Amino acid sequence: MKKRAFIRWASLLSAWAITGAGLGQTTVDEQAFRSLSDAGRYRFVHDFPFDKMDSSGLANLLPRLLDIANEKGDRHTAFAVLYHKCRAREALKLTAAARDSLFEEMETTAAEGGFEIEAVVARHFVILENYQKIRIPPGQSYAEILQELEQLEAIGLEKFRDYSVARLLFQDGSFLYQLEDYERALPCLLAAEQFFDLEEKWEMYWVIQVLNYVYSIYQHQKDYPKGIEHAKKLLDFVRTYQPKDTVEGNLCHDWQGIASIDIASMLVAQKKFDEAEKWANEGYELVKTSEKSGFQAETEFNALTILVPAKIELGKMGDAERLLRRMETIHETFPQTGYFYFKHLGFYESCVKFYEKKGDLAAAMRFVLLAKPLKDSLDRRNDVRKLEQIKQRLDAQKYTEQIRLVEREKEIEHWQKNAALLLLALVLALAFGIFKRLRNRRRQAQAELESAQKELEMFTSDFRKKAELAENLRLETEKLARLGERSEYLERLTHSTILTEDEWQRFRSIFEKLHPQFIAEQKALFPDLTPAEVRLIVLEKLDLSTQEMANILGVSVNTIHQTQSRLRRKTGPSPA
C-alpha cells in the first residue's frame, strides 16, 4: 500500500509539473509526457483533470496524448486516453459514427494489448450504446450485462478503480432496476455504493441515484428498515454536500424533501403514523419551497399523497381537509392523458380515505367510482409491463443459452483439436519408439550378421588350412608308400575327420545365422537327405573344392563323388 501511495504521489507531482497546475493551467508539456515511463504516462492520464477542460481543449489535447502513446507503443496509456475521450463524448459532441469508431478502437486496443480489464470496460460502453440506440433487443442487452457483471466479479472489482468502477456498476444496476430485476440490481448498486469516493470528484448525481435506487428496491421488497436506513444516508449526503453551483444547490434541496417523503411513506407502510407525519411535514415544507418550477407542483402533490393519509390516520381531519384542498388544486392542473393520467389516482384514493373517516360513504363511493377505471387501467398497464419484462428476461435467457451453446461448441471444438493433436503426438511418439526399436534391432541383427560372417569366414579359412594340411599329409603318405615305406601314424591322421560333430554343430549355428532357412528348406524339399548329404550341401554352398570337402570331412575324393551322385539323383542337377 505504501508503494502504491508513493507511485500515485509521484505521478501527481509529475502531472503538476507537466500541466503547470500550479498556474491553474491545463496545458501539457508533450516532451515531458513523452519522457515518462509507460506506467508514469498511464497514471498521468488517469489523474489528469479532463473534467475541468472545455470541449475545444479536450478536442486539442486528447489526440496529442494518444499520438504520443502510440508512438511509444504504450497500448495501456493509449487505452486510458481513449477511455477519457469516451467519457467526454457528450462534451466533444461526437457523431454516432465517431462514437462507434471510438468504441471499436477501444476494443481493438484492449485486444492488441491483451488487457482483460480494459476489454471489459470497452465492451461496457458498446453494450450501453447498443441498448440506448435500440440496435439490439433488450433481452440481448440484459444477457450481455449479466455476463459483464460475472466478468467484473471474476476479475475483482478493485482492479477497475481506474475506470470508475462505481459508475460501471451503477449503469449496469440502473439497467437492471429499470427492468425491475431487483434481485440482481440490488447487489450491483450496493457494490457501487462501496466504491463512491468524493475525493475523486464523483458527480453528486450518481451518488444520489444509487442511494435512491437502493432504498427504492428495499421499499419494493418491503424491507422497510433497510430502506429507511439508505434513505437517511441520502438525506445526510445532500445535507452535508457542498454544492459547486446553484443547480447542485437546488438539487440537494429537492432531494432533502424527496428523501424525507419517502421515509414517511415507508413509516406509513409500517403504520408508524406519528413518526411518518413528522417526516412528511418536513418533506412537504421542503418541496413547497423548491425552485424547480417545472416539477414543483408534481413533487408537492407526491408529498401530499403521503402526508394526507398520515393526517387522516392520526385523526387530524382539519389538517387533512386543508391539505386535500391543496391537492385538489394541483390535481386540476394535471392533463388527462399521458404520464399525468395516473397521477389523479393518488388524489381519488386520498379522498376515499378522508370521506370514509368522516363517515360520508356516498362521497367516498363517488371517488371509488372515479378511481376504479384509473386503477384498472393502471393494473392492465402494469401487467403489460410485467409481461414485457418477463419476455425480455426470457429473451435474455435464450440469448445467454445461445452464447453458452456457442462457447460450449467452441470448447468442444478446441478440446477435439487438442485431443487430435495429443493423439497425433502419441502416434508420432509411438511410431518414433517403434522406429527406434526396429532400427536398433536392425543394427543389432546387422552387427550379428557381420559377426557371423566374419566367424564363418574364419571357420572356413580354418577348414581350408586343415584341409591343406590333410592334403599334404596324404601326399606325404603316398610318397612314402611309393618308396616302400609306411607310417601308420600318418595314415591314421590322414583319414581323421576335420569337421567333428562338435565342430559341425558350432559351424551349423554360425551358418544358419547367415543362411537361416537354407538347411530347413533343403530338408523340406528333400526329406530323405542323410546327415552326411546335408553336410556336403552346406560345404558346397561355401564353394569349397571337392578335395577340400574330402579333407574336411575326413573321407576320400571318391566318397565325395559318390555322395554327390546320390544327391543328384535325389535333388536333380543342382543340389544347392
Image (spheres, rainbow, N blue to C red):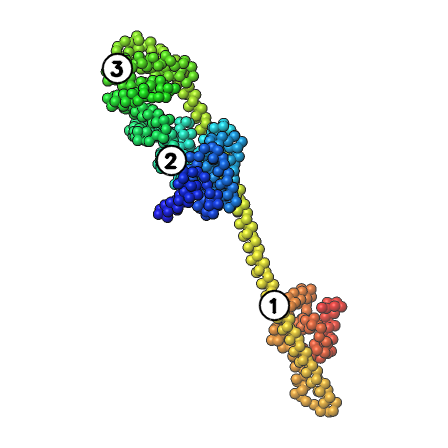
Asked if residue 13 can be seen in this view, the reply is yes
Q: Position of residue 316 (x, y in %)?
A: 24, 15
Image spot of residue 175 (x, y percent)? 42, 29
The answer to whether residue 381 is above or below residue 541 is: above
Q: N-terminal of the two: label 3 or label 2?
A: 2
Residue in view at x 65 percent, y 81 percent:
496
Return the residue nearer the eye: 141 or 50: 50
Asked if the residue at tag 1 contacts the one at tag 2, i.e. Cβ–Cβ closer than 8 Å, the answer is no
Instruction: Please tell me which of labels 1 and 3 falls first in the chain.
Output: 3
Kindly state the secondary structure of the residue where label 1 is placed.
Answer: helix
- Give the crowd class for mark 2: few <14, some 14-19, many >=20 residues within 10 Å: few
Give residue 234's position: percent from left, percent from top: 32, 29
Looking at the image, which is closer to me, 376 or 497?
376
| Image quadrant assignment for residue 531 | bottom right
Nearest to viewer (mark 3 / mark 2): 2
Q: Secondary structure at mark 2?
A: loop
User: Which residue position is annotated with label 3?
Assistant: 319
Q: Which mark is residue 473?
A: none
Q: Which mark is residue 201?
A: 2
Residue plotted at (74% across, 75% down) = 561
Q: Which mark is residue 447?
A: 1
Q: Is mark 1 in CB contact (under 8 Å) with mark 3?
A: no
Towards the viewer: 426 or 324: 324
Q: Work out which residue is located at the far front of the displayed protein and give it.
A: 23
- Callouts 3 and 2 close, C-beta under 8 Å: no
Which amino acid does the dot numbered 3 rest on? Asp
For marks 2 and 1, the one nearer the N-term is: 2
Which element carries disc 3, helix, strand or loop? helix
Q: Quadrant of residue 521?
A: bottom right
Q: Amino acid at mark 2?
A: Lys
Disc 2 to disc 1, C-alpha distance: 86 Å
